[in-house]
Image (spheres, coloured by chain):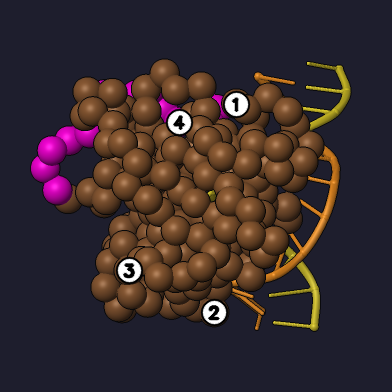
Chain colours: A brown, B yellow, C orange
DNA sequence: CGTTGGATTGGCT
DNA sequence: GCCAATCCAACGC
């Protein structure tokens, strides 16, 4: 869970097959933990969520609502089943390519939601299980840490269980944060671990 | 094997 | 603010 807020401010990089580079500064994440009823891993491994149960540092990509791909970072060791959903980023590099993929021009509409982010970065099922540490297609660079005081946490968006867990983390006031519809903000994240 | 509904988005009222 | 789009994994029979 603690890695979810730590990903804020880091740079998510995608290298396309033609060699071009796309990048965005992560501004919104959500944590999905072992034993968490809102997590895809809650009922154990399946063909879809298998990557979640593998080693940390890999990309878990899944498809939902008939249209959208979601990008997650696997964060725990083999067998545990955890992930951090990458929900939004501030476009930094390759805005033209992102705009074409998204059919939108305004930067704030390119990566401001989990489905939008994957579409802008040309991420789909083919990158499920991609190596984020040593792989050539997608990775995370250190970026600039976001000061704790600028991080807000809220209930996670779009889930019906686990609402008591304020595990959505965002950069307060950033225009690239998604328009989620969670409950009221709960302020800065708790310092204690679950 | 059929049904259900989803870690969403964008367009329309 | 509301809701259809659109696919498929999960689950029940």
Residue named by callout 2:
A47
- Same chain for marks 2 and 3? yes
Q: Are marks 2 and 1 in contact (CB under 8 Å)?
A: no
Residue named by callout 4:
A182
Residue A56's disc is: 3
Q: Closer to us: mark 3 or mark 4? A: 3
- Which is more N-terminal, label 3 or label 2? 2
Q: Position of residue A146 (x, y in %)?
A: 28, 32
The chain to which mark 1 is attached is A
Q: CA distance from mark 3 to mark 4?
A: 28 Å
Q: Report whether A180 appears left or right of A109.
A: left
- Displayed quadrant of residue A165: top left
The chain to which mark 2 is attached is A
Above or below: residue B10 compared with residue A36: above
Q: Secondary structure at mark 2?
A: loop
- Is A184 contained in the magenta span? yes
Residue A108's disc is: 1
Q: Position of residue C3 (x, y in %)?
A: 78, 34
Q: Secondary structure at mark 3?
A: loop
- Which is more N-terminal, label 2 or label 4? 2
Q: Could you classify mark 1 by the number of other residues whose Cα lies within 10 Å: few (under 14), some (14-19), or many (20 or more)?
A: some
Q: Could you classify mark 2 by the number of other residues whose Cα lies within 10 Å: few (under 14), some (14-19), or many (20 or more)?
A: few
The chain to which mark 3 is attached is A
- Which is more N-terminal, label 1 or label 2? 2
């Amino acid at each position: 869970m603690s890695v979810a807020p730590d990903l804020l401010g880091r740079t998510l990089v995608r290298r396309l097959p033609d060699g071009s580079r796309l990048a965005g500064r992560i501004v919104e994440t959500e944590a999905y933990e072992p034993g968490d009823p809102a997590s895809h891993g809650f009922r154990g491994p399946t063909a879809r969520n298998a990557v979640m149960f593998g080693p940390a540092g890999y990309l878990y990509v899944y498809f939902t609502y008939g249209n959208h791909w979601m990008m997650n970072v696997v964060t725990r060791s083999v067998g545990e089943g955890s992930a951090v959903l990458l929900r939004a980023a501030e476009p930094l590099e390759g805005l033209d390519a992102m705009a074409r993929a998204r059919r939108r021009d305004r930067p704030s509409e390119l990566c401001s939601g989990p489905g939008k982010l994957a579409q802008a970065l040309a991420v789909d099922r083919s990158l499920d299980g991609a190596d984020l540490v040593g792989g050539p297609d997608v990775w995370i660079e250190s970026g600039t840490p976001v000061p704790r005081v600028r991080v807000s946490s809220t209930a996670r968006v779009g889930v019906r269980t686990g609402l008591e867990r304020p595990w959505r983390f965002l950069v307060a006031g950033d225009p690239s944060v998604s328009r989620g519809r969670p409950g009221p903000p709960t302020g800065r994240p708790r310092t204690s671990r679950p």
